[in-house]
Image: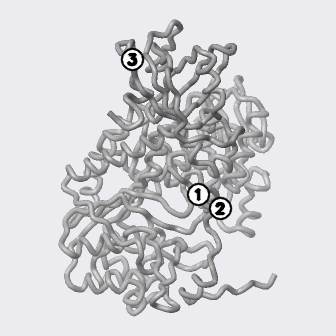
Amino acid sequence: MVQNRTHTCGELRLTDAGKQVKLSGWMENIREVGAELAFIVLRDFYGTTQIVAETPEMVAQFKAVNKESTISVEGTVRERASKNPKLSTGDIEVVPTKMEVLGRCRHNELPFQVNRSREADEAQRLKYRYLDLRNPEVKSNIVLRCQVVSAIRQAMTDHGFLEITTPILTASSPEGARDYLVPARNHPGKFYALPQAPQQFKQLLMTSGFDRYFQIAPCFRDEDARADRSPGEFYQLDMEMAFATQEDVFAVIEDVLPPIFARYGKYSRASSAPFQRITYLDAMENFGTDKPDLRIDLRVKDAPAALYDCGFGPFDTRERQASEGVLTIKAVVVSDFHETRKFIDKTLAEVEVVSGGKPYWFRLDENGEIVGGIAKFVQPIRDEVISALNLKPNDFVALAAGKQTAAWKTAGVLVKTLGAAVPGHMDREQYAFCWIVDFPMYEIGEESGELEFCHNPFSMPNGGLEPLMLAEQGKLDPLDIRADQYDLVCNGVELSSGAVRNHDPEIMVKAFELVRLGEEDVKAKFPAMYNAFTYGAPPHAGIAPGVDRMVMLLAGEDSIREIIPFPMNKNAADVMMSAPGEVTAKQLDELHIALVKVEE
């Protein structure tokens, strides 16, 4: 027995007919049929039950209450004359003898209809999230999240991992995104930072002698929102293993995740171990991205040499080399293509918006003739192009041109967009996992134009110290150094990055020297980790799959905000709580902070 109810609104069945019951919940709807008859839908966390008011007095009581008020109803269960097979309680109804208002809704008009809240404007949904969450469809995603987190915890514990929480207030660390800073009242002019990830702490746990660590870790990054990334904060399954290699990490993940995806996912099929492994370079060459969606059967191909001098301006090697450097042309061939010109124009326009690169096209009609797009430039080299790309009638060819990275990016968006839009090229009903391995250790920064770490600066270079020494001596291009780093990708979504860690102070210093940071810089930026490693650190490796992205995939949602209980909007603002907000002058004084007005 629970206070205010004998049963939930999803519990009663035909076997309960004749019972005296008390239900409590929200009055979702009322449908009047004259002055003496009304049908009320009562909803709680567990489901809905139909209430039938059959007297003028009882109808009047329900009519006097606004929708979404919380009420309790006492009455008798009886069999419904007109059953509803779509509801678990569709065989019964309750005839009330008493109704009590527990929490009155004081608004005649709601911001949106609760059971159709997903159709409402997102700003309204976020402002009134507590109403949005009353929608069973929205609530089910949060329930799913709870179930998945519980299953993860159990699986990790079964694999011998200890759940250890790490600090939220810590030191600022250059880990690729902007920190959220917290002023320290007792240390004027100094700041804590909210952790972008528990990276250093989990490595210190390995150095401390813990063998297997995990936590469902909150992470904080001041970065812009995307469909698969929530601004402000997110959660990840953070794990680390001592005396471990890449293979050890793969074995755990491949044992933990597939059962969870198979049990809780929208699709019943999930990749089984071992997951396909694709090198970073192969991923870029064949998919145009390091986040390939293996459900799509399209691949990126090198364009035939004849296209480079076919007379089409954007493909002209002399012109492009003079202005942009080495030109690369990539092709994506879509077989059995029967779409309209309107479809082509709309789809390629979307690709240009997403990739920033303009795609070009032509196709073979049913007679094997080259038509459409840049056909007049391709026609003179028809045989060579058809042979090189192995084209058949009704094949569509999309082309991307530019510097290698730009051509890769545009081709990758072509694969994803065309694969999803053209029937027959995407097996949607599955979870397709893969590992991306052999990432570059370094890259040239887009803004700085100088050598920078490609991903995690704490990764072990493939080969240890030797390739770093060869690079320092000018015998090896730093861009050719590979890291013992790996990404876990599912359905084109990066779930996680991980790596074998650089646990040797000498190798760590040498790795940072290549990006113009010396030993003193390393000591200053990572004092605890550097000093701990000088006391003898074990080889260790780890990974951190994103919980939010995982649940988003399991729920089949396109936006990560659908599976977070109280998400921020795209501008990292909580419109429900009015955060961020202003604070008082007294609070600023206590924190030794002065606000300076910026001149426009």
User: Mark 1 and mark 2: span between their CA atoms?
Assistant: 8 Å
Which of the numbered marks, if any, corresponds to residue 467? none
Label 1 crowd bin: few (<14), some (14–19), many (20+), radius 10 Å:
many
Residue 573 pos. (x, y %) = 62, 62
Question: Hey, which residue is sitting farthest front in the picture?
Answer: 57
User: Mark 1 and mark 3: span between their CA atoms?
Assistant: 40 Å
Residue annotated with mark 1:
568
The residue drawn where x is 41% and y is 78% is 170
The residue drawn where x is 40% and y is 58% is 236
Look at the numbered discs 1 and 2 and tell me whether their residues touch, using CB distance below 8 Å.
Answer: yes
Look at the numbered discs 1 and 3 and tell me whether their residues touch, using CB distance below 8 Å.
Answer: no
Q: Which type of secondary structure does the marked residue at label 3 adopt?
A: loop
Q: Nearer the viewer, residue 53 or 459?
A: 53
Residue annotated with mark 2:
571
Q: Which type of secondary structure does the marked residue at label 1 adopt?
A: loop
Tell me the quarter of the picture where residue 598 sits: bottom right
User: Mark 3 and mark 2: span between their CA atoms?
Assistant: 47 Å
Disc with the residue nearer the chain's start (1 vs 3): 3
Which of the numbered marks, if any, corresponds to residue 13? 3
Q: Is residue 43 visible?
A: yes
Q: Quadrant of the N terminus?
A: top left
The residue drawn where x is 21% and y is 75% is 208
Look at the numbered discs 3 and 2 and tell me whether their residues touch, using CB distance below 8 Å.
Answer: no
Q: Which type of secondary structure does the marked residue at label 2 adopt?
A: loop
Label 2 crowd bin: few (<14), some (14–19), many (20+), radius 10 Å:
few
Residue type for callout 3: Arg
Residue type for callout 2: Asn
Disc with the residue nearer the chain's start (3 vs 2): 3
Label 3 crowd bin: few (<14), some (14–19), many (20+), radius 10 Å:
some
Which of the two discs, 1 and 3, sits closer to the camera?
A: 3
Q: How is the image coloured?
A: one colour
Please count the marks in the image: 3
